[in-house]
Image (cartoon, grey):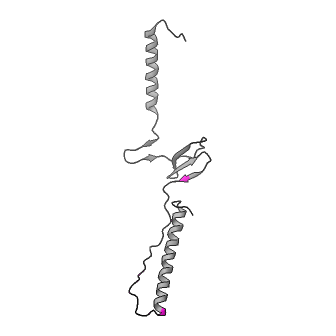
Amino acid sequence: MDRYPDDLFAEIQRLTARVEQLEAQQGQRAPLTTASQGWRMSNMTIPSVSAGTCHIGCNGGDVFSVNSAGDVKRMFKQGAAAPFTTFDLGNAPASYDQTYAQQQSVGISRLFSGHTSLRASLIGAEHIAP
């Protein structure tokens, strides 16, 4: 194409028509997400990702990210239910007998069990490291 066309008005018309065509094509593409009432993302297959980048999407109803090594991380995992344990210290008796000692031992064992369940749940949901 000549760098300095003879008919500049014809060139302007051609460029204007091309811009209008490109603008029309831009409006035809469906949006990837909508956010009028929160984000809505359609499920997709987990793609391959170029080196040095990551991709965020939705798969199976879960938000995920995948990096160039192919490591997929599901976001916002919910851990398994962990029991809520209460421990009543009560009033210590004037003298410690076998029954009181056993009650304290059972209480401490329940607290430890609850702590262990909560920790396992958080690790399973990848909220904390093992």
Q: Is residue 109 magenta?
A: no
The magenta-colored residue range is: 73-98
**Which residue is more in the foreground, 79 or 92?**
92
Up/down of 21 relative to 103, above or below: above
Residue plotted at (45% across, 22% down) = 19
Q: Is residue 75 magenta?
A: yes
Q: Quadrant of the C terminus?
A: bottom right
Up/down of 21 relative to 61, above or below: above
Q: Quadrant of the N terminus?
A: top right
**In terms of image quadrants, where is residue 23?**
top left
**In terms of image quadrants, where is residue 120?**
bottom right
Up/down of 77 relative to 69, above or below: below
Q: Residue furthest top?
A: 6
Residue plotted at (55% across, 61% down) = 129
Horizontal and vertical percent position of residue 78: 48, 61
Up/down of 130 relative to 39, above or below: below
| Residue 59 falls left or right of residue 27 | right
Horizontal and vertical percent position of residue 71: 60, 51
Residue plotted at (52% across, 11% down) = 3
Q: Residue furthest left?
A: 36
Q: Residue furthest front?
A: 94
Horizontal and vertical percent position of residue 68: 60, 45
Residue plotted at (47% across, 34% down) = 29
How many numbered circles does the render carry?
0
Magenta region's main secondary structure? Answer: loop
